[in-house]
Image: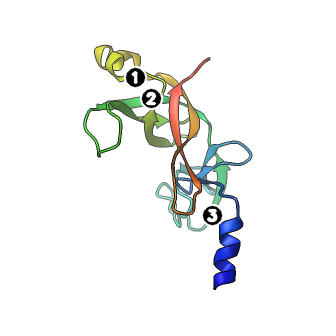
Amino acid sequence: MAEQSKAESTEQPGKRPILPFLKLEPTPHLVGSKCGKCGAVYLDLKRMACSKCGATNQFTQIPLSNKGNVWVFSVIHQSFPGIKTPYVTAIVDLPEGVSVKSNLVDIDPEELQKNPQQAFGMPVEMVANVVSKDRQGNEVVAFQYRPSKN
């Protein structure tokens, strides 16, 4: 037992994704499950049945686009202690037909509240940022979206 903890303590901490559908290699991206029968795509890696056609166990993992469009957003003014407010949370529609909830970064929440129409349909791109460290010293990486530069 002592040998195991000694070996663990000499290992270099790494990075780990905050959710299983966020992959960090080769570059950060989201993955989904695609139904082999009807082509429906889900942001779920353990799906057993397709809710569109009813097919079972016919899913393959596919990479999802890192670009999308804001469907709806909310400016959050109150949160848990230690979380800086205000911040913007949004539902982002991806081209594969999947919607994902995430925070928007590199955008002024106060400006967005003054002119909310600028956000609806806004093109965004995914970024992956270290948000915390776990008990083993690994950096925890989350995905967020920022306005597209294109």
Q: Earlier in the sequence, mark 1 or mark 2?
A: 2
Is residue 131 something one can see in this rendering?
yes
Mark 2, secondary structure of its residue: strand
Per the model, the C-alpha gap separating discs 2 and 3 is 30 Å
Circle 1 sits on which residue?
Answer: 120
Give, as a three-letter code, the residue at label 1: Phe
Reply above or below: 56 against 69.
Answer: below
Q: Position of residue 141 (x, y in %)?
A: 56, 47
Mark 3, secondary structure of its residue: loop
Residue at x 65% of width, y 57% of height: 13
Left or right of residue 33, residue 90 in this image: left
Circle 2 sits on which residue?
Answer: 70
Q: Residue furthest left?
A: 78
Query: Which of these two is toward me, 21 or 37?
Result: 21
Q: Quadrant of the N terminus?
A: bottom right
Q: Earlier in the sequence, mark 2 or mark 3?
A: 3
The quadrant where residue 116 appears = top left
Give, as a three-letter code, the residue at label 3: Gln
Residue at x 51% of width, y 62% of height: 135
Q: Residue furthest right?
A: 26
Per the model, the C-alpha gap separating discs 1 and 3 is 35 Å
Circle 3 sits on which residue?
Answer: 58
Q: Quadrant of the C terminus?
A: top right
Give, as a three-letter code, the residue at label 2: Val
Q: Position of residue 69 (x, y in %)?
A: 49, 28
Q: Nearer the viewer, mark 2 or mark 3?
A: 2
Q: How many marks?
A: 3
Do the CB atoms of the residues marked 1 and 2 lie less than 8 Å apart? yes
